[in-house]
Amino acid sequence: MPTVVIASPKGGAGKSTTAILLGTELAHAGASVVMLDCDPNRSLALWADRGPLPARIRVLASVSESEIVKTIKQHDTDGQIVIVDLEGVASRLVSRAISQADLVITPMRATTLDATIGVRALQLIAEEEEALDRNIPHAVVFTMTKAIKSKQHSGIAESLAAQGVDLIDPPLMERTAFSGLFEFGGDLRSMPPQGNMDGAIGNAGQFARAVYQRLTGEV
Ligand SMILES: Nc1ncnc2c1ncn2[C@@H]1O[C@H](COP(=O)(O)OP(=O)(O)OP(=O)(O)O)[C@@H](O)[C@H]1O
Ligand SMILES: [Mg+2]
């Protein structure tokens, strides 16, 4: 089963939030999910400690550079989806994780500064593709977007599309429920209502389906 690596050298781009939303939505849909926390700041481990883990999710914390490839191979077995959350840097650990990916997702705020730094993830992927002589599917998802799309957002989307970058639709909107994951742990369904819950669950579910479709080719 597939390994999805969430990578961006930009700090605070929404990587850990994207990893948790993807993992919890896929688990809710019936998948077994193993989440690897490779960030020394331990965002996923902190989330996992915060509340009861949803069914079918396991979190392995403190996965280091020397263990990452072995750990992915161990868990990348039938019936499990591996999701890897990384620190916001470019490092050998990040490159090793990317080398094992069936899909790399780069979360990115739709602002010029964030996009400029975020696209460096695409460079890292290109380097791994060259080293391994294989295609590594990758996609960008805009995070923390507002209900009304800014000109900057549209401009960056057009520029990415012109470079042939796969942009996941829908983006992950800025939502109180999404930041609430780190406060309450668990998933969107277990937390006390935060803002528009139906909207948040709908957004996360559609995002996870769009990712699943890329992994399987199924609609
Ligand atoms: N879609 C969203 N809606 C609301 N808040 C969000 C959203 N995405 C991220 N956040 C908040 O923004 C902050 C940074 O998000 P997150 O920790 O997911 O980013 P990151 O890329 O993993 O950061 P780091 O590089 O430090 O690992 C957190 O406080 C998180 O709760
Ligand atoms: Mg993080």
Image (cartoon, grey):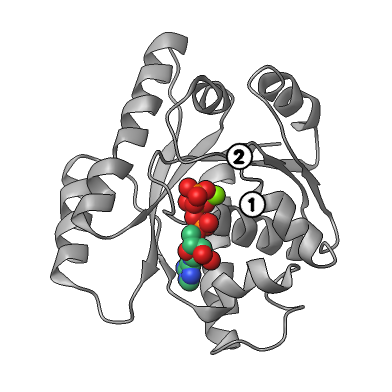
Instruction: Answer yes or no: disc 2 within 8 Å of ligand 2.
Output: yes
Image quarter where the C terminus lies is bottom right
Q: Which residue corresponds to the image point at 68% horizontal and 16% vertical from the top-left?
A: 66
Q: Which residue is mark 2?
A: 39
Q: Is residue 158 left or right of residue 34?
A: left
Image quarter where the N terminus lies is top right
Residue 162: x and y in percent read 16, 45
Instruction: Answer yes or no: disc 1 within 8 Å of ligand 2.
Output: yes
Q: Which residue corresponds to the image point at 80% horizontal and 42% vertical from the top-left?
A: 79
Quarter where residue 84 is shown:
top right
Q: Give the answer, above or below, for where 45 lies relative to 169.
A: above
Residue 178: x and y in percent read 56, 72
| Amino acid type of the residue tagged 1 in the rendering | Ser
Which disc is residue 43 wearing?
A: 1
Distance from disc 2 to disc 1, alpha carbons, whole Å, reads 7 Å
Q: Is residue 74 left or right of residue 166?
A: right
Query: Can the viewer see residue 47 in this picture?
Result: yes
Q: Secondary structure at mark 1?
A: helix
